[in-house]
Image (cartoon, grey):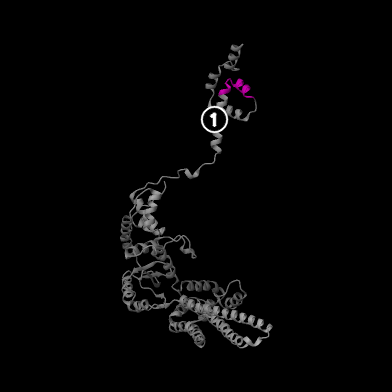
Amino acid sequence: MVAQVIGTAAVGASGIPSGMAARALGPAQRQELSVEVLAKTEPLTRLAAEHGVSRKFLYAQGHKAQAALAEAFAVADDDQAVLYYLPITKSWIRQFVLGLALEGHASFRDIVQLGCDLLDYGLSVGTIFNILQAAAEQARVINQTQDLAGIGVGAHDEIYQADHPVLVGVDVKSTYCYLLEEAERCDETTWGVHLLDLERQGLRPDYTVADGGAALRAGQAAAWPQVPCHGDVFHAERELGKVAYYLANRAAGCISARQKLEHKMERSKRRGRGNQFSKMLALVRKAELEAVALAEDVRLLADWLREDILSLAGPDLSTRRELFDFVVQELARREDFCPYRIGPVRRTLAGQREDLLAFAGVLEEEFAALSEQFDVPAFLVQQLCQLQARRTNSPAYWRQQGPLLAKLGAKFLPLQQAVRAVMTDTARASSIVENLNSRLRNYFFLRRDLGNGYLDLLRFFLNHHRFQRSRRAERVNKSPTELLTGRNHPHWLELLGFQPFHRQ
């Protein structure tokens, strides 16, 4: 009986032994069997008898299918998956060092630590210095061979690092930095010498914009006597705005003092001593009225100076001069109420009137050219300029636009676009160089001593590094050099002789 059972298990329904039947099954048949095993639609013993295989074989196929399904639906550990392989060469290490120093704003010690932590590669401070110095020599050559004839308006300033001045010059339109030099002192001779050196590279702007620095202006007057230096309206607006803010706080303090004194007087009245604070309260109320009136007047003058006199969209030059003088006279009338605050600002404004309003003269010249080009009266072009000060969604804009549209007809739209272009290209402030100074601070604080070699490398990087974003669409994905020349250039690492890594 036992032998009969064993014989039945070993021989399938087809009469073929189960071992031979299993070996005869192909991959597709095995896959079908494994699916039937996992589906459990019929008993395993019957399935084994139908196909002439053993139950052990069916269990093995079911385990294989289960393992394949588990692998297919398992959550992959992407953090440990190899994305690509990077060949680490000495050339790549040099690029790594330059990228960390210039793009990552890393100090020498940070680069050493990152090399050990991420690459398991030892770098010394001296090696890093040598890499930067070698790149600086190549950068200096590129900087000195750049043609600067395309620069129309320059912005100048100086920034101090460890008591040493760093002279800065930037093209207002393209943001190209053509001057970044450390000097022993900031005087007329130093500025004049550097400007004459730049003239040999073709730099001869129509005019420059700078703050009231005496050495800067004297050096330019000596080197470029025919190039005017316009005033920076930002500093003038800021200084008068600071005075207005101070006076507003002082007025608020007077109001608070009057309220406290009135509260004390109310309590004294309840005790029958109401006259105790009468005289003092009268003096405080008088001081409050004077402080509030002074704060309101100076705030009004500051707003007038910023929004009408020194704004691009404003009256003609002669009218701006009259309004400017009026503001200075009104400040002089109120100077006795706060001489240590109003006095310095008033004297500064009085001495810089022509420099601060020089941009209005540039606008008038450009508007006169537009008047001839479009064959329209000059006063209509000026009115079109003033229209740009209005918000397009305000009723005042459309009320002012109607008469101009009726007079200009089909010329209105192209002339308006031309006026806007002129206003956009006219520089009133050296804000572009102030922006560069703020970016330079992120590099300067890492170093005790700068050195002109490092500044040459930094200037090269800033001029050839492409903007990732900008308020001006024409600057996005463009470098200052590309904006200046109108031509594309390779990656800044390629310009220094390296071959940046690219995945295959």
Q: Which residues are magenta?
A: 43-56
Q: Residues within 10 Å of mark 1 (few under 14, many from 20)?
A: some
* Residue 136 seen in the current view: yes
- 209 to 75, vertically: above or below: below
Q: Position of residue 452 (x, y in %)?
A: 32, 65
Place of residue 427 in the rendered image (x, y in percent of width and height, measured from the top left): 45, 74
* Image quadrant in which you'd find residue 48: top right
Q: Is residue 375 visible?
A: no
Q: Is residue 482 left or right of residue 53?
A: left
Quadrant location of the N terminus?
top right
Q: Secondary structure at mark 1?
A: helix
Residue placed most toward the observer, 4 or 424: 4
Main secondary structure along the magenta-highlighted residues: helix
Residue in the foreground of this view, choosing between 27 and 413: 27
Residue 11 in picture, x, y percent from top left: 58, 16
Three-letter amino acid code at the position of disc 1? Lys
Residue at 52% of width from left, 41% of height from top? Answer: 76
Residue, disc 1? 64
Closer to us: 279 or 459: 279
- Which residue is at 65% across, 26% downward? 42
Mark count: 1
Q: Is residue 235 above or below residue 97?
A: below
Q: Residue at x 57, y 26 (%)?
A: 59
Residue 316 covered by magenta stretch: no
Say if 483 sits above or below 117 in the image: below
The answer to whether 497 appears left or right of 6 in the picture is left
Q: Residue at x 63, y 86 (%)?
A: 276
Residue 49 among those drawn in magenta: yes
Residue 375, x across and y down, in percent: 50, 78
Give the quarter of the image for residue 405. Answer: bottom right
